[in-house]
Image (cartoon, helix red, strand yellow):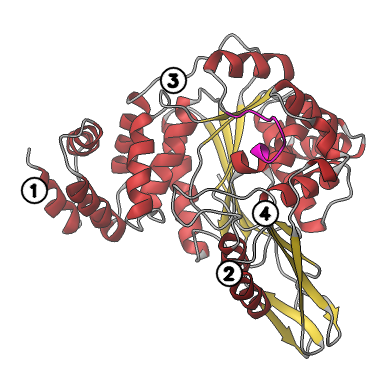
Amino acid sequence: MRTTDIIRQKREGEELSAEEIVYMVDGYSRGEIPDFQMAAFLMAVFFSGMSEDEATAMTDYLVRSGETLDLSGIPGVKVDKHSTGGVGDKTSLIAAPLAASAGVVVPMISSKTSGFTGNTLDKLESIPGFRTDLSVDEFRTVLGEHGLAFMQQNQDIAPADERVYALRDLTATVDSIPLLASSIMAKKLAAGVDAVIFDVKVGAGAHMKRQLDARRLAQMMITIGRRADKRVQAMITDMNQPLGFAVGNALEIMEVSQTLQNMGPADLTRISLELAARMIFLGKAAQSLDEARDIAQTKLIDLSGYRKFKEVIVAQGGNAQVLDRFELLPNALGAREITTPRGGYVSGINAEDIGRAASMIGAGREIFSDTVDPAVGVILEVKIGAKVEAGSVLARLYFTNEDRVEEAAEMVEDAFRISNAEPESRELILEMVG
């Protein structure tokens, strides 16, 4: 086989064999295929796509490139939840404790990625002392004792995926549907889970801008999962405005605490409860989805999920008091109010612009190597449908230094669309797949 022939085949839209895909990814992992050729291959995939067979073959190799966690010593069905990411998305930190408090075993293994705002690991690491760099043995111990544990993907779990992802990040190919599907599923299969519920975001603040593409991604992940004999479902949810009010790592931990105490935003609570219910159902802790929804609601109201999250924070070295005393979290040094020059109804909030503004002041990563500032971010004061007067505060920008604050403030203001007519209500959960 020749690398240039494989790149040419994929550029022309031909379907590759499993052997050809393994040749490319394995060769790159070993350093035998240089960055520039792998970059060309990734771009060819971005434009030509992959079949389900090709994506499955790539996933299989990524899993085999490292170790698969053996969680068989921990009783119960292991259920993971994964979001494709969005602005203000902190549902993992709500749904996972709710499901775990219902008796589901929830192993959460994530990797740090670039994006408008920090990911699950960044949010957790804004809690003083919280460790995500657990060894496999430590992860198993926490999971066995509490039914929930969070761990950063280490070099032994799908290591080829981490190397390929870093190049995708640099070559603007992260949004490729088959590459996304194989990368996500490789981590899930290597984590030794039995079932996964996916929250596939679609809209301005998501990787997938069109619902058709979100559905294709969901279907491809479900196919890969079922071929590996896993129970897999996917929700497609709206990400045209930020989820909840908080955007930024420590700010989102505050909102997680409020939501787990049944005092959170309606949109964040609704999606988190549905995700938790499906985790409970997939984990066989309920006989029907309706029963699972009742259980999730009960665990929210009686604060079982809140207490479970506190347990895990302590078990992983963190200070659980932050959920009650927000001053113990990293706090920004400055704040800037964003007001509206005219009255009317909020008819749109561009989630991507809010995310970019938060990233400008340090809440996210523009490239993988960037450092995240846990204290900074944006708090929305209104959501779509709210009536506002001229001069009303739309959002507050929290920062630790003044670099790019003016630019970020302008972007936040421009993200809001004010209209004379009240907008129609929006669907939050757009469809279920699988």
Q: Is residue 425 left or right of residue 209?
A: right
Q: Nearer the viewer, mark 4 or mark 1?
A: 4
Label 3 crowding class (10 Å Cα cut-off): few <14, some 14-19, many 20+? some
Label 4 crowding class (10 Å Cα cut-off): few <14, some 14-19, many 20+? many
Kindly identify the amino acid type of the residue bearing the numbered disc 3.
Answer: Thr
Q: Main secondary structure of the magenta part?
A: loop
Residue drawn where x is 41% and y is 40% of the image? 183
Asked whether residue 388 appears in the rendered view, the answer is yes
Magenta region includes residue 1: no
- The foreground one among 39 and 209 is 39
| Mark 3 or mark 4, earlier in chain | 3
- Mark 1 — residue? 5
Residue 68: assigned label: 3
Q: CA distance from mark 4 to mark 1?
A: 45 Å
Q: Nearer the viewer, mark 2 or mark 1?
A: 2
- Mark 2 — residue? 404
- The foreground one among 100 and 253 is 253
Q: Are marks 3 and 1 in contact (CB under 8 Å)?
A: no
